[in-house]
């Protein structure tokens, strides 16, 4: 079996395992048999389909979106420390969400979805602003310019967020909870809201897998190899931003997944984007599902924010893989 | 194939390349030369389309560069930039496969057999097939360079732009790489434009050269038109000397250093010659520039030791070179620092004399035996025997190349005149001999003191050589004959 086939097999087994654990483990243990025989235990089937499954799927979508966007940004910026939040899009989404909570905004016919919708709009506006400004500064949009613009915008938006947090009173806990990230109590409508963005964004990135490979050798080299650098850069930035914005909008700013999953994927399976992108997608989904499982069970019945767990689980795993890779063996 | 018309460009407002025009024919190799900062790399970026020109146009097959979509351009033109570091690990195979990018299209385009063949061939050409799954970062700079050349070759483009392709390579790999590229250029009719730092490599491999300075073309043409001392000296601001390649009709350049160890003025003196029955030897403190027809280290070079060794008349000359080298090393001299000739004459009869003139002095040393005298105008098939007139002229002065040759001619004429004067007869024809069948001559100079651009009989040094060689040869023949009689 070729190395890449093995990679997909292992990753898919991990994902399926994570999903199975995600839907069966919890305060009420549910047997898998309920899936093909819902009549056997109506209550369990209800929990599985209406509470756990949407939660697992949403966690999976968010994890996948952040991981594939991280992989693409790391490749595009030629920097293994880049993550989906580097360009400031997440700060835009966060400001939108915090603003909703701070001002207690509720748009009538959106109801509960006011927050994710405003958050998504925040992400979109930020993305356009970052790109527009970067283009204004430097017509060729060198990556350094884009990164710097992203940093300028995220620190500015960050200060607005801090201002609102400083002035807030009773919403503080809610805001902090949202910022740390969570996928609980969202249900299928959130899944429906995130799904199209995640699919389209991921597909766009996947279309540019070969261009990403070429751009790892530098924009100039990529152009020599026949890559339409400007168009590819735009497409990857927009694709990644759409993914990041939608993920943050439905779940908050969950850290670590977008940085570490692509990194681990590269360490274990090599840095060819034709495989790094889909593998990051699968592994990101699996990691976040497991993290969410831990977040809601570890000190049950209290739920922890998922962002606390991602780093708590992810960092040791990352350390282990990093150590084995550098010291040989595995 | 490639036309560059009035091309200007640079970074921001700074114009680095200024109205450059030239063309390259299909299948030709053009080398771009120029000092650092002369605009070579900028010109390359303008030609490859990475940099927008401020004016002018680049045409491939008559079509302006701007009309090509990125992928189509990459199928026409492959570029090898200077080596850069990168953040992620790639295997050699992955890296070279990227060269096939412009040949792939569509969402799900898969790896074709043609792609595979091109990658395999590129790896074979650059001799890196065995590195296929090695990580780039684990390779040396030279190996990485070969990987990137293979990547460019895998592109299968008709035009190849190279920015210092021999960077980081040792001389063997420099040669291998340029041989490969040249071979590709010939076999596949590739058009190659390459930047070179090494003028000699460029001269050897390129059909045409282009010498740049301060963004403009100083000279363009075949290597012999461009690699000229004057242009190279003024553009690179350094002293060079120009000489032919030993095998190819291409000029080569040698750098002349600005700093030399200060040496005490050395003089060649007749009394420093050691004359024994076994040999005549002169050991100089500093190497002398020497031109000779000796047995060991003939031709031109710089040497400290000069040896004229006596051998028996029945000496086997078939492997004389190895035997002589052994002899030199055996007597404590370094064979690489010694010019050696041989004679069957008794070396204690050598004539060594010093001659003075206004310019300085020279020493003539002659051993002569004329039992083997030959009238060269009658010399057809003859038996080879050990040479018998060995003439050395050591000059305290600076001789030019032409002076060395004129000194040789003058010495030979003087020798012939001496044979005539002494009525040496060719025993076979009965006519007056002009020399013997295996004479050797050596001219050496300290290359210090007065400059002597010419050494024909019209010059002082030429007159001295003529007189000196004549006198010494006559004297040596007389001694030889006296010794024969007794």
Image: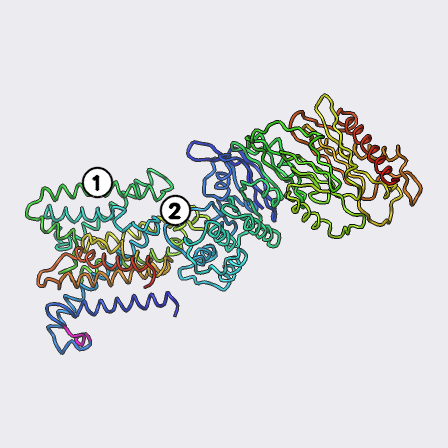
Q: Is residue B400 magenta?
A: no
Q: Which residue is mark 1?
A: A156
- Left or right relative to A303: residue A236: right
* The image quarter in which residue A309 lies: bottom left
2 or 1: mark nearer the eye: 1
- Left or right relative to B371: residue B16: left
Residue furthest top in the image? B358
Residue A230 circle label: 2
Q: Is residue A258 above or below residue B202?
A: below
Observer-nearest residue: B140 or B288?
Answer: B288
Crowdedness of circle 2 by 10 Å Cα count: few (<14), some, many (20+)?
Answer: some
Instruction: Specify whether residue A196 is in view.
Output: no
Observer-nearest residue: A272 or B257?
Answer: B257
Q: Secondary structure at mark 1?
A: helix
Instruction: Specify whether residue B299 is in view.
Output: yes
**Stretch in magenta:** A30-35
Q: Is residue B387 above or below residue A54?
A: above
């Amino acid at each position: 079996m070729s190395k890449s086939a093995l990679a997909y097999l292992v990753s898919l087994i991990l994902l399926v395992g994570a999903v199975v654990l995600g839907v069966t483990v919890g305060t009420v243990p549910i047997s898998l048999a309920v899936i093909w025989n819902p009549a056997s235990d109506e209550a369990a089937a209800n929990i599985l389909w209406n509470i756990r499954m949407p939660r697992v799927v949403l966690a999976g979508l968010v994890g996948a979106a952040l991981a594939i966007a991280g992989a693409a940004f790391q490749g595009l910026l030629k920097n293994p420390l880049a993550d989906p939040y580097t360009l400031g899009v997440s700060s835009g989404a966060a400001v939108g969400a915090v603003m909703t909570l701070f001002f207690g905004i509720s748009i009538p016919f959106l109801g509960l979805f006011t927050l994710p919708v405003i958050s998504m709009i925040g992400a979109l506006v930020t993305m356009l602003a970052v790109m527009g400004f970067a283009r204004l500064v430097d017509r060729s949009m060198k990556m350094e310019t884009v990164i710097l613009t992203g940093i300028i915008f995220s620190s500015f938006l960050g200060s607005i967020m801090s201002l609102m947090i400083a002035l807030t009173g009773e919403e503080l806990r809610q805001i902090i909870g949202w910022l740390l990230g969570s996928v609980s109590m969202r249900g299928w409508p959130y899944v429906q809201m995130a799904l199209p963005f995640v699919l389209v964004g991921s597909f766009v990135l996947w279309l540019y897998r070969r261009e990403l490979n070429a751009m790892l050798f530098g924009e100039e080299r990529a152009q020599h190899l026949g890559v339409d650098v400007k168009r590819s850069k735009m497409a990857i930035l927009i694709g990644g931003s759409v993914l990041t914005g939608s993920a943050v909008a439905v779940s908050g700013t969950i850290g670590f997944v977008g940085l570490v999953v692509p990194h681990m994927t590269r360490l274990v399976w090599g840095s060819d984007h034709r495989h790094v992108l889909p593998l990051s997608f699968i592994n990101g989904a699996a990691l976040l599902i497991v993290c969410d499982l831990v977040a809601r069970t570890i000190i049950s019945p209290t739920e922890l924010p998922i962002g606390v767990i991602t780093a708590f689980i992810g960092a040791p795993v990352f350390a282990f893989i990093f150590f084995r890779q550098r010291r040989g063996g595995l | 194939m490639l036309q560059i018309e009035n091309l200007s460009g640079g970074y921001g407002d700074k114009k680095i390349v200024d109205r450059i025009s030239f063309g390259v024919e299909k299948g030709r190799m053009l080398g771009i030369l120029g000092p650092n900062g002369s605009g070579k790399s900028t010109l390359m970026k303008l030609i490859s389309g990475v940099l927008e020109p401020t004016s002018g146009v680049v045409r491939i097959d008559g079509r302006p560069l701007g009309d090509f979509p990125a992928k189509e351009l990459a199928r026409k033109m492959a570029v090898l930039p200077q080596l850069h570091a990168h953040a992620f690990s790639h295997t050699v195979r992955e890296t070279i496969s990227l060269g096939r990018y412009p040949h792939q299209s569509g969402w799900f385009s898969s790896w074709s057999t043609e792609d595979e063949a091109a990658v395999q061939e590129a790896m074979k050409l650059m001799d890196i097939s065995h590195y296929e799954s090695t990580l780039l970062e684990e390779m040396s700079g030279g190996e990485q360079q070969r990987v990137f050349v293979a990547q460019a070759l895998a592109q299968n483009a008709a035009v190849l732009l190279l920015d210092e392709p021999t960077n980081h390579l040792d001389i063997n790999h420099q040669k291998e790489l340029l041989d490969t590229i040249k071979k590709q250029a010939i076999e596949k009719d590739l058009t190659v434009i390459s930047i070179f730092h090494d003028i000699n490599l460029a001269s050897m491999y390129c059909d045409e050269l282009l010498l740049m300075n301060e963004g403009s073309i100083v000279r363009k043409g075949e290597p012999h038109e461009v690699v000229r001392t004057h242009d190279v000296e003024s553009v690179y601001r350094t002293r060079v000397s120009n000489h032919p390649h030993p095998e190819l009709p291409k000029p080569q350049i040698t750098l002349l250093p600005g700093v030399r160890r200060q040496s005490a003025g050395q003089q060649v003196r007749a009394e420093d010659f050691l004359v024994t029955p076994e040999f005549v030897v002169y050991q100089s403190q500093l190497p002398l520039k020497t031109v000779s027809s000796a047995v060991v280290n003939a031709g031109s070079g710089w040497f400290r030791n000069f040896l004229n060794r006596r051998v028996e008349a029945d000496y086997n000359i078939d492997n004389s070179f190895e035997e002589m080298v052994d002899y030199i090393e055996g007597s404590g001299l370094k064979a690489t620092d010694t010019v050696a000739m041989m004679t069957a004459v008794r070396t204690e009869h050598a004539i060594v004399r010093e001659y003075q003139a206004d310019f300085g002095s020279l020493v003539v040393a002659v051993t002569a035996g004329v039992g083997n005298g030959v009238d060269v105008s009658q010399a057809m098939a003859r038996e080879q025997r050990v040479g018998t007139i060995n003439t050395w002229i050591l000059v305290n002065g600076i001789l030019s190349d032409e002076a060395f040759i004129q000194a040789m001619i003058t010495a030979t004429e003087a020798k012939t005149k001496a044979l005539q004067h002494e009525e040496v007869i060719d025993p076979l024809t009965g006519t007056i001999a002009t020399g013997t069948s295996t004479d050797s001559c050596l001219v050496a100079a300290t290359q210090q003191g007065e400059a002597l651009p010419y050494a024909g009989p019209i010059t002082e040094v030429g007159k001295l050589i003529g007189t000196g060689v004549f006198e010494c040869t006559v004297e040596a023949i007389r001694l030889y004959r006296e010794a024969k009689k007794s």
